[in-house]
Amino acid sequence: MGILLFITVLLIAACGLIYELIAGTLASYLLGDSVLQFSTIIGCYLFAMGIGSALSRYIDRGLAYRFIWIELLLGVVGGFSSALLFIAFAYTQGFQLLMYATVIVIGILVGLEIPLLMRIVRSRYHFRDVVAHVLTFDYLGALGASLLFPILLVPYLGLVRSAIVFGMLNVAVALWSTFLFANQLARAQALRVICLVVLCGLGIGLAEAKHITTAAEDNIYADEIIFARDTRYQHIVLTRFKDDIRLFLNSHLQFSSRDEYRYHEALIHPGLSAIPVPRHVLVLGGGDGLAVREILKYPQVESITLVDLDPEMTRLFSTHPMLTALNQKSFSSTKVHIINADAFPWIDSSAASFDFIVIDFPDPTNYSLGKLYTTTFYKAVARHLSAQGLMVVQSTSPMFARDSYWCIAETIKNAGLKTYPYHVYVPSFGEWGFVIAGTHEYSPPATLPAGLRFVDAKGLPALFQFPPDMAPLPMAPNRLNDQVLVRLYDKDWKDISH
Amino acid sequence: MSISRREFLQSTSAALIGLSFKGERPIAGSFVNDSFQQGHLLRDRASFPAPKQTLKVPVVIVGGGIAGLSAAWRLNKKGFHDFVLLEMNDQAGGNSRWGENEITAYPWAAHYVPVPGPKAVFVRALFEELGVLKNGQWEERYLCFAPQERLFLYGRWQNGIEPAIGLNEKDREQFQRLEDQIHQLRATGHFTVPMEAGFSDSTAALDRISFADWLREQRMDSKVLNWYMNYCCRDDYGATTDQTSAWAGIQYFASREPEEKGPLTWPEGNGWIVRRLLERVGKFVRTGQMVHRISHTTNGFSAFAGDIEYRAEFVIFAAPTLLGPYLIDGMPRLHDFEYSPWLTANLTLDRLPASYEGDPTWDSVFMESPTLGYVDATHQSLKTHVDRTVWTFYWAFADGLPPQNRQMLLDRDWKYWKEAILHDLERVHHDIRQCVSRIDIMRLGHAMARPTVGAIFSGERRKLANSHGQLLFANSDLSGFSIFEEAQYRGVTAADAVLHHLSGTKNRPAK
């Protein structure tokens, strides 16, 4: 019986550690900042184990019976912890609260296991031997678990199924214990039936894990998709590879955290720095808060109104720690007013006036988005420019979609505005183009805010030069009733892929 | 954010219910705007109350469709305010009536106006007043957004309604030859909008044969070309090519210069124009006032509506001319006025079908269908994202005899027509039943004038069209076909004739 008993210890130790590792890994993947996540989870877990050990002294009768129930509970709570946390992250606001609660419950249960087991077997061995053997196998189990976890479990089973497998192990220990401690149990038969039922439940969970897990979990190790969700308006996917976070909307890349500063500095500063006293800024699109981060570098700016269609986007970039680190919590600024609305009807019905208007929409890949690149739209926007006002328009690539780029420039001009096209190089996008437009003359500013990493005042005039392969082409303007741009864009990108 | 969580739970439970009940989604709806009951009262010469009140009004306009409202607009514009407009229905607008639900406004019939050419001076004047035409530029937000039209044929969609795929050499040659022919006929200047601007006896021969015969004479027997010609006649006249006068078939193509990418359209269709007109002349309009008799008086006419006698010098009769003999004392029966029965339906869609394919388009037509397809009421929305929408479904009963079709329209219940509509849509959108939550249906027994062979040059019609004196006819059916520009032209010119007479009366020395 001795060796079987100590294998039990080894198994329950492994289970305990696996739940802890799963919680830590999940939190790091979903929230980022792995040092913080692992430290707090290990701390909570160990502290909860202490509570469990302390509580063990209040259990004085039916030790084996209670031990078996603790194993069953651990099997259920630990086994489904991963699935539960994934679902909580995807669909609720209370992920962190639930995560620490789960860790504490598991910790308390694990903390109860060893003291109870020691007391169950103490009559058979010397106290000295009990302590030595139990703790030896406890630590051995921990070693096994910590090696298995990264090498086999995460890559081959994934987090959800690993947790369930170890939950089943806990239940197996319970079942086994009904035989091991049969002499101390009054209703061993009933307990065995319960164990089998719970085992079946976990077994079903294992078979259905594919359905429980989100696409994010399945890919968590392979592709590092850390977030994937269908909102009412779009499919949002966030990926991470080492320190590079990328955002995809409907599978179109929106930014890479490695070089987005180039894009957003180029989008904001050439225009905004040219305005003598910018007080009110409007951002259309830009739900990632990265353009707002650049605008907040101007202390004179009193208000930033951001209109983005998708509340899930602005919420994600207001709350997700990895993303708020990227936009420097720009949405928390008291200057920022977020409005979740369709931009065209909003601008059409608004009466406000702005000194700088940033238009940062997805590329005109279809006729719906194409409405946001029409003469009527730019005319509607221009009505909101103050006397010193300028607007800047994200205008796709003058290199890969040269016709489209110059079509956008022509459309803005056709809306009765003076246009100043420029371009920059963003490695993850390639050559990228913008157009500054307004009712008055524009010239590049002589000074820019301090601390920029990419654009500098000396280099600005060069951005407005287009080499021959990106030079202007005569294009018809894009109109609501004749969206030439959508057709051009489609053709431009097809030409590249063939 | 708790809302989004709740929404998630709702959608999940809805999905679970959807899985467990493969059964059909309930679709609500009814017949709406039925007005044949009133028409039948007139037809059957029911007895109406004797007048209890007599009102003296110099000018009475009978009928609040585009013709009547345009007459009112013109009188008002010229500073004449001493008139009333009597409309039988509770809502003015006639064939340009509209509806509205929580998603959008939508049309009940006429839903666009082609970009008016230079000869449509009254239409241009109206559109300048309404801000649709500014400094010679058409306001883009009222031009139909891209993509405009598509046709489902050979199991796929193409852009535009004129068939462009799967054509053989013969089809192409005939389409080209037709285009050249139309170009020549357009150059004669006799096919214009409004039709009176270029009307000439030199084209009378074309009114003596059917459009189908004319196409045969031109050796145009391509099936695809004939399908398209037939579609155009069904769409504009509610008739097939062999029931349509060749003159009218040619008018459809030769009267318009394809210049601006149009047409002009609004979510509620031409109801948008009615709304603007009512903002201006609504105070003269009395709805729910069915005129049941018009009789001569010593110095003009009396119109009886309900228990009121309107004593007028002038009556502008803008209601469908077919009602004239039933109302007007001494007016003989008409022989040359035929009308097509129509059905329109507005379908509320909680989502677009998965089988929709492609970008949301204004007008979708199926080649293999007796119906005219459907128009998306949210297409003119500035939004980039539209979850729910309303489709207006058009069905002109072109085949067969109008009286029989009219009877069928009345005899069959809402459920029958609902199924017929869904069945038609299902040939392309197999999942349409899962998307539609409501279907309202409007039946119009005499929806549009039918330009049958001989109708355009009919002596009876020409006489009424050129009526003068104190009873002036103004409905678009006097042109032989029902389109916005004709209705507006006839309304405006009738108003001008009244104003001309009145100014003459004033200048006459008192006896």
Image: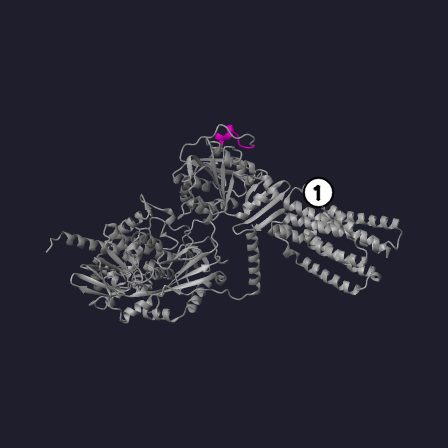
Q: Please check the rendered image and state whether residue B437 is part of the magenta-colored stretch, yes or no.
A: no
Q: Which residue is mark 1?
A: A39
The residue most toward the left is: B511
Q: Main secondary structure of the magenta part?
A: helix
Query: What's under tag 1, amino acid-wise?
Result: Ser
Q: Residue at x 75, y 64 (%)?
A: A193
Is residue B503 shown to the viewer in this render?
Answer: yes
* Position in image of residue A189 (x %, y %): 79, 65
**Vertical side of B495 occupied by A370: above or below:** above
User: Quadrant of the rendered structure where residue B491 is?
Assistant: bottom left
**Host chain of mark 1:** A
Which quarter shows the C terminus of chain B? Answer: bottom left
Which span is picked out in magenta?
Answer: A453-462
A348 or B134: nearer the viewer? A348
Task: Tell me residue A469's x, y (percent).
Answer: 48, 36
Q: Regarding mark 1 in the picture, which secondary structure is present there?
A: helix
Is residue A487 visible from the viewing direction of this image? Answer: no
- All told, the count of numbered labels is 1
